[in-house]
Image (cartoon, coloured by chain):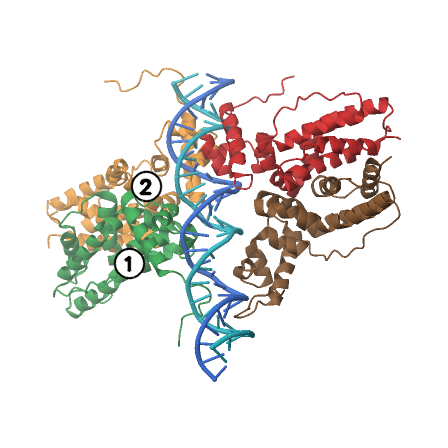
Chain colours: A green, B orange, C brown, D red, E blue, F cyan
Amino acid sequence: MSSSPPSRGRPRNPRSHSAIVGAAAELVVEVGYAATSIGAVAARAGVGKDTIYRRWPGKPELVFEAVFTTTDNAPTPDTGTLAGDLTVLLQGLVDEFHAPAAAAVLPGLLADFAADPVLKARIRSDFLAPSKERLLIVFERAVARGEIAAETPVDLVLDTLAGAVFFHIGLVGEHPDPQLAALLAAVVAKGIEVR
Amino acid sequence: MSSSPPSRGRPRNPRSHSAIVGAAAELVVEVGYAATSIGAVAARAGVGKDTIYRRWPGKPELVFEAVFTTTDNAPTPDTGTLAGDLTVLLQGLVDEFHAPAAAAVLPGLLADFAADPVLKARIRSDFLAPSKERLLIVFERAVARGEIAAETPVDLVLDTLAGAVFFHIGLVGEHPDPQLAALLAAVVAKGIEVR
Amino acid sequence: MSSSPPSRGRPRNPRSHSAIVGAAAELVVEVGYAATSIGAVAARAGVGKDTIYRRWPGKPELVFEAVFTTTDNAPTPDTGTLAGDLTVLLQGLVDEFHAPAAAAVLPGLLADFAADPVLKARIRSDFLAPSKERLLIVFERAVARGEIAAETPVDLVLDTLAGAVFFHIGLVGEHPDPQLAALLAAVVAKGIEVR
Amino acid sequence: MSSSPPSRGRPRNPRSHSAIVGAAAELVVEVGYAATSIGAVAARAGVGKDTIYRRWPGKPELVFEAVFTTTDNAPTPDTGTLAGDLTVLLQGLVDEFHAPAAAAVLPGLLADFAADPVLKARIRSDFLAPSKERLLIVFERAVARGEIAAETPVDLVLDTLAGAVFFHIGLVGEHPDPQLAALLAAVVAKGIEVR
DNA sequence: TGTTAAGCGAGACGGTACGTCGGGTCTTCTC
DNA sequence: GAGAAGACCCGACGTACCGTCTCGCTTAACA
């Protein structure tokens, strides 16, 4: 039943792993995504470049792990109304995208993922999966309450919400409109409600 | 009031300009944005690198001009309803983002713009200005028809629409959902209507 | 008089030894001395790198043992004349240096030995010792025959002979002049004879 | 009649050339041939690595030019006897090989040349050409004086002399036997004389 | 018989150098 | 002074070896 391989040879040093991830997270906020080089990460982590390439195929994958591994354990909102749930959910998205490391990294990181066919497929799964999970539950409740139709297209709504937040924070403005979450939630909730 | 410089010495060759822009547009679809270098553009255009740097500060500005200078002369839609107008407007946005050159370039280009404080300020003006202009007119008509309130936040709606389209096309999927424009327009129109 | 250590623990596997030496000898003729790495030798021998480093300090010593351990049991020539003896002796040197492995290895190997003060001292003893031994006997007989003086400088003559052969084969030409041994022997014999 | 090309573009900076050659000559005596890297040469010369690779294919060619470009304008000896001429000629060879830079470089450099088929062909022409020229003249005079036969094999003698000196200095001993030139000249002269 | 020390294959580790490429600047000659 | 050409310094790339280390395991001599 054990899924672990026989593990021959010297095992990888877990301290190196966290040192690398930490160094990447620091560098990325200090100099930006584009100016963060594998060599610089290795130097700051006190590690050889090989040790990085042995674990990650390249900068995008490394930075993704370094920045977006805040184990997303936020509870699914349950305010009683679709608009309320969406507001909470969106505020979480805003906070996540607005964190220093994420803001420094998101545009370049998404561009690198989009440029590689293999990575491109991971955008939805890696970046949006947790949000989609919560959104599904929120929708289920809204359906049960009769607020929205059962066939409401989750992916389209998610693209809309995430795209709006990403555009607003990552590309357009430095500081997000504090009402962004509420306004957007209100518009979208009203837009998809059955009446 | 004349803004033309005294223009001493040899005037700039306008053929070089179009050769450069053309070469950049070609390269960008052939090898992608990241792999397009100024040197390669210069070589294909039969031009020295300086001739490029004399006209553009760098790759982002050059590529932007090369890809997004389809003189946007599409007429502002006037279908009689907000949802109809938004659908037409969104379909234009989808078509623009889905064009080969634009799709190849958008994520990387926006990332480079976002990474530079000077360029970041130009995203709204350079990328979204034409759409915003048309959206304003559409909104004016909708206000006149009593569909929406006068103080409807244009920028927020524009971020939402553009973000959704950008996410859907540029980052997530290869081929846009053919109903994307209609669905999104319906949701947003209903979401911002007064009743 | 036995210098063998108490030999605790698992004894070294003699099969590994010969596998390593064999792999090194093969690689050296296939890819050359410079391109032969310890890692590649270990991989071909089916052995860990440490098993090599446990037995040899580095590539030069390993390759030397792999290539120059043709137990030199050729008999000392005794043709009756100094020139004849030198010819036989030189032909042996030519054959030894001209062997594929030796030719592939000699320049680089000697360079590595020369670059290391410790190894440098071993060039005379390790590479030239067998030849010197035979040359001494040849000289003794020639002195007894009255052909040469007793104080003829063996080392100088040996350097001359070995240097000439090394230069001719290892550095300058691919195929040695078939008369090299005879001509060189004739010149040197005549040059050091008493009359 | 002009053999210079049209010379388009910015001409190569001759100061860079000499800075590189100088840095290489210094490094080679300080750390040895093997430990001299192109990157280190570039750093010391205040030059980019490209600037080196633009002019030389690799380390061997660069170091050769850096160390062996002492325009060999020594006059051909004319002492009246073959042995005398050879002594002078050999002493020149000894001095050349014994110079710090040459001694530090010769074994490794010759090994690198010997390992590359293209470079291997240049050993005779680049390293031995000047000596061969002088040796030819010395032989002509000796033939005229009746000391040696007209068909005396120059290349064989040259290999012998150079090989002996190289072996004695470069590989075997640190300090050359002060009598090396005289002894070797005497032996070889006597060995090839007609009587 | 059980302990212990070394050998062993595998492969991770921190380094260093490789040779190439792109960036943005400069320096030449020609138009 | 624009332009084509290309040299220049810089720094990052991803790879290859170096020689050492750390695993789990095996193999003997010693207690």
Three-letter code for the amino acid on which mark 2 is drawn = Asp
Camera sees residue D48: no
Residue under pointer 2: B112
Could you tell me residue B127's position as x and y percent? 28, 40
Give the number of the mark in front: 1 or 2: 1
Instruction: Indicate which disc residue C32 carries.
Output: none
Could you tell me residue A162's position as x and y percent? 24, 54
- Per the image, label 2 sits on a secondary structure element best described as helix
Comparing C24 with D144, the one in front is: D144
Comparing A164 with A111, the one in front is: A111
Q: Is residue C119 above or below residue D165?
A: below
How crowded pointer 1 is (Cα within 10 Å; few <14, some 14-19, many 20+) is rated as: few
Could you tell me residue D153's position as x and y percent? 81, 33
Q: Is residue A92 above or below residue B18?
A: below
Comparing C173 with D177, the one in front is: D177
Question: In the rendered view, does B2 fall on the left or right side of D186?
Answer: left
| Disc 1 and disc 2 on one polypeptide chain | no
Pinpoint the chain carrying mark 1: A
| Picture quadrant where residue D101 is located | top right
Question: In the rendered view, does A20 fall on the left or right side of A193?
Answer: right
Camera sees residue A95: yes
Pinpoint the chain carrying mark 2: B
Quadrant that contains the N terminus of chain C: bottom right
Quadrant that contains the C terminus of chain C: top right
How far apart are the alpha carbons under marks 1 and 2? 24 Å
Task: Tell me which residue sits at (41%, 27%) in the image.
Answer: B51
Question: In the rendered view, does B194 fall on the left or right side of C177?
Answer: left
| Picture quadrant where residue A154 is located | bottom left
Could you tell me residue D71's position as x and y percent? 63, 23
Task: Tell me which residue sits at (39%, 49%) in the image.
Answer: A115
Instruction: Indicate which disc residue A69 carries.
Output: 1
- Per the image, label 1 sits on a secondary structure element best described as loop
